[in-house]
Image: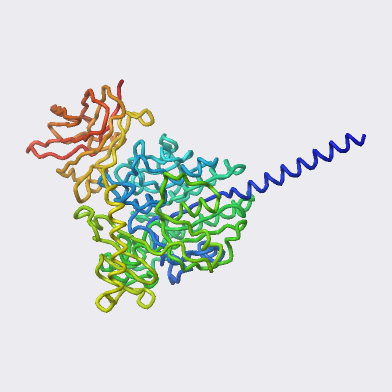
Amino acid sequence: MPIGSSVIRLLFLFCTLWLSAAATSQADRPNVILIMTDDQGYGDLGCHGNPIVKTPNLDRLHRESIRMTDFHVSPFCTPTRAALMTGRYPGRTGAFRTSSGRTMLHTDERTIADVFAASGYATGMVGKWHLGDNAPHRPQDRGFQDVVWHRCGGVGQASDYWGNDYFDDTYERNGRFEKFEGYCTDVWFEQSLRFVEQHREEPFFLYLATNAPHGPYRVDPQWSDPYKQTAKWGAGPQFYGMIANFDHNLDILRKRLKELDLADNTILVFMTDNGTANGGKFNGLTSEPTAGFNAGMRGKKSSIYEGGHRVPFFVHWPAGGLVGGRDVPSLAAHIDVLPTLAELCKLPVPDDHQPDGVSFAAQLRDLDAPPARKHLVVQFHGGAGFAEGPQAWKDSCVLQGPWRLINGKELYDIGTDPAQRNDVADSNPDLVRQLRELYPPFWESVSPRMTPVSIDIGNPAQNPTTLCSQDWYMPRGNPPWNFNSIRKLPKVTGPWKVNVFQAGRYRLTLRQWPVEADKPVVAIRAKIQIAGQTAEQFVEAGTKGVVFELDLPAGKTELLTYLYDASGKAGGAYFVDVEALR
């Protein structure tokens, strides 16, 4: 009997220790939900002083969170997403433009999803990706195990599913198109909750990137009507209505996390991808608003001035002590998010990942901790219109303390001049020289990686695949990337940088519209060039796709297409379906 009692006591002790270890392990492995809205600026929240838009749930998250108040991203969609996913400067990743074949990460880049998945996390991505529509660049190719997303840079743009308009759209779920009911933002949150509920018993990382409030500005009038009398600039009511709808969905998500007993041990992050697109009326990209609100800053989306790249960043994690509504004034950036979340979750980042970012976890926990980052370089490679290729200093900003050095020439002290009205470069030559010295190491390190990234054809992960003209690799400017431009059948063409995944016979079908549009080709002759081969044929009247079959060697090459009208003028095939036959 005593022996049995001893055994029982030992078993009880073992079970207690095991349960304690399991609980500790779970607490050490918090869930992460990283939320990023699209084109919502620092001033587009009530908690930041906006007198028009109502964001009660974002305001509550703000009150309860640790806030990075000097947090910066890139001035445009794709570069911010590239930096956020990799922890590396956008130019280094290869994805530093929103079209023109420069939206995809080099294949040797590793993502935050790779880091979390390698440590046993379930990884999910919902909403806007904008880092490539084709293998090997889709979210499911980049470490995300469960994805529901729309293609290209916005719902309804050229490579998105034909006919999508924000309501009852067709999105891609894990490689297959699927019809969804409801408004796009509602769908993204519903699918996020589905992912959370499926993985509630294991640690998970969820990246929820809404397309709202990116244009086109479409939302149910119940959300936009309250702003008709107060946001009196182009589509201002719709822009704010999209933010209000997001705010409503955020409340639903947080309440459900609490019901599932997940709220305490979930790191909830809210941020945006660049400055405001439509939170006011601006004279160009670099002005202060003449109507609306921009938190006292100059510049909007696509500007290298403060309003173009300073954004909100809130972190809420009760189990980790990240609560209470405290501001952290330290300089931080999108490239710092990956190392910060990895440190908070105690995850190893492989040595060969080599992030440019640094963790600001210590600053989140301790206001007296020294700043993790001494300076930052933000550069919009190629500028807003991509009128010329990336150049040293062009469209750049060096940030250090309160100082902003613009294009290596203009100097502003945002501590005393937040609107950047007074260029003080002439009176501070030594400071200008010191800040200029911070830029060359950045450019010399990043610029060699701004090289073409190829799309796979014949990859078993996506065969057939559909190429879209938004990915033509143009020397400058944008190719046809939306249906407004494609409808005009512009007489322009450009090359796709492709990688023939395996040698063999390929079928290439040239179209001016995606197959779902069911529209005929308007041309009399077609030509194709790829891998040193040229083929031509006449186009039969009424055909909806011009088919070529070629034997292609494996390796990287270019694909060029031409569709000639009766006058002999040629534009490209804006869509090409490519299938490896054997």
Which is nearer the eye, 325 or 290?
325
Q: Is residue 489 above or below residue 521?
A: below
Residue pushed farthest left?
567
Q: Residue at x 14, y 43 (%)?
A: 491
Left or right of residue 17: residue 331: left
Relative image position of residue 377 (x, y in whole percent): 34, 60
Q: Quadrant of the C terminus?
A: top left
Residue 311 makes an appearance in the image: yes
Q: Residue at x 17, y 41 (%)?
A: 493
Quarter of the rendering containing residue 150:
top left
Residue pushed farthest right?
1
Residue pushed farthest top?
582
Left or right of residue 206: residue 460: left
Left or right of residue 220: residue 436: left
Quarter of the rendering containing residue 229:
bottom left
- Protein image colouring: rainbow
Q: Quadrant of the N terminus?
A: top right
Q: Is residue 282 above or below residue 152?
A: below
Relative image position of residue 33 (x, y in whole percent): 52, 51
Which is nearer the eye, 427 or 266?
427
Which is nearer the eye, 563 or 272?
272
Relative image position of residue 266 (x, y in whole percent): 57, 52
Q: Residue at x 11, y 37 (%)?
A: 565
Q: Is residue 494 above or below residue 79?
A: above
Residue 423 makes an appearance in the image: no
Task: State how many labels appear.
Answer: 0
